[in-house]
Amino acid sequence: MWMIFAALLAAAETPPAPTPTPTPISLLAPSSAGTSSRPGSLAELARRIKLRLPEGSEGRTITNESLKTLATGVELTIAKAGPPVDTEGAEQADAEAEQKQAYWQERYWEAQAELEQAEAEVRRLEAETARLQNEFYSTDDPALRDGVVKPAWDQALADLQAARERLEQARTAPDKVRDEALRNGALPGWFRGTAPRRPTTGGAVQE
């Protein structure tokens, strides 16, 4: 009887074991390359869930009762992957921008080249008319002077007038092309610091 009474007394004096504070767990859906961020079915979500249990839970059998304990203080978080980077769209936009720049630079350089050609043509015809004028007044033969030199001089004067009119138009062409390009979204730097390219005999344009 005494032994039974001592055992009961010891049990009464032993404090109950404290209830362990549940450790929060997180359910994470790890993102991976090629996985869409759009939620699928519950089965698909379950396959992507990684269960991270508290320390010391390894080997524990999951039952209805243990789930209640584990659920205490649990915070469920799902890591959402960011939107995929549209590299193909970015590359296409860069290519279109380069084509646009090349197009407007080409037109601007052609306008510059036409201006230089018009200036050169005016200089050539001015020299030609001056030569024919001197030849007209220095020729003693009336037939040669009036029948050959005078018609050539008149034609050179007409050509010079037409060349000067083309030059006036050519002088405004580069600025017109640049203004049109700027209205179309071109950048001012596209037309600065670059020498115009010269057209070849085949009509192509080269540096």
Image: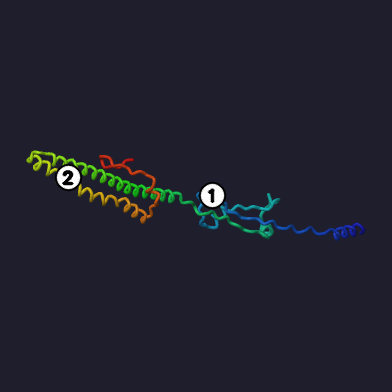
Tell me the distance, in whole angstroms, between the alpha carbons under discs 2 and 1. Answer: 79 Å
Query: Residue pushed farthest left?
Result: 143
Relative depth, front residue between 116 and 109: 116
Q: Position of residue 96 (x, y in %)?
A: 38, 50
Q: Position of residue 138 (x, y in %)?
A: 13, 39
What colour scheme governs how the chains and residues are painted in the rendered image of this protein?
rainbow
Looking at the image, residue 117 lies above or below residue 37? above
Residues at marks 2 and 1 touching, judged by CB atoms closer than 8 Å: no
Quadrant (top left/top right/bottom left/bottom right) for the C terminus: top left
User: Which secondary structure, mark 2?
Assistant: helix
Give whichever of discs 2 and 1 has the lower sequence position.
1
User: Which secondary structure, mark 1?
Assistant: loop
The residue labelled by disc 2 is 156
Q: Could you say which disc has been placed on residue 203 in the image?
A: none
Observer-side mark, 2 or 1, equals 2
Q: Could you say which disc has been placed on residue 32 in the image?
A: 1
**Which residue shows up at 20% across the image and 49% down it?**
162
**Which residue shows up at 43% across the image and 48% down it?**
91
Q: Amino acid at mark 1?
A: Ser
Horizontal placement of 111 versus 55: left or right? left
Q: Position of residue 106 (x, y in %)?
A: 33, 47
Looking at the image, residue 199 lies above or below residue 174? above
Quadrant (top left/top right/bottom left/bottom right) for the N terminus: bottom right
Q: Position of residue 23 (x, y in %)?
A: 69, 56
**Which residue shows up at 41% across the image and 49% down it?**
94
Bin the neighbour count of mark 2 within 10 Å (Cα to Cα): few under 14, some 14-19, many 20 and up: many
Bin the neighbour count of mark 1 within 10 Å (Cα to Cα): few under 14, some 14-19, many 20 and up: few
Horizontal placement of 186 versus 140: left or right? right
Dividing the picture into quarters, in which one does residue 148 lie?
top left
Relative depth, front residue between 130 and 159: 130
Relative depth, front residue between 2 and 27: 27
Q: Amino acid at mark 2?
A: Ala
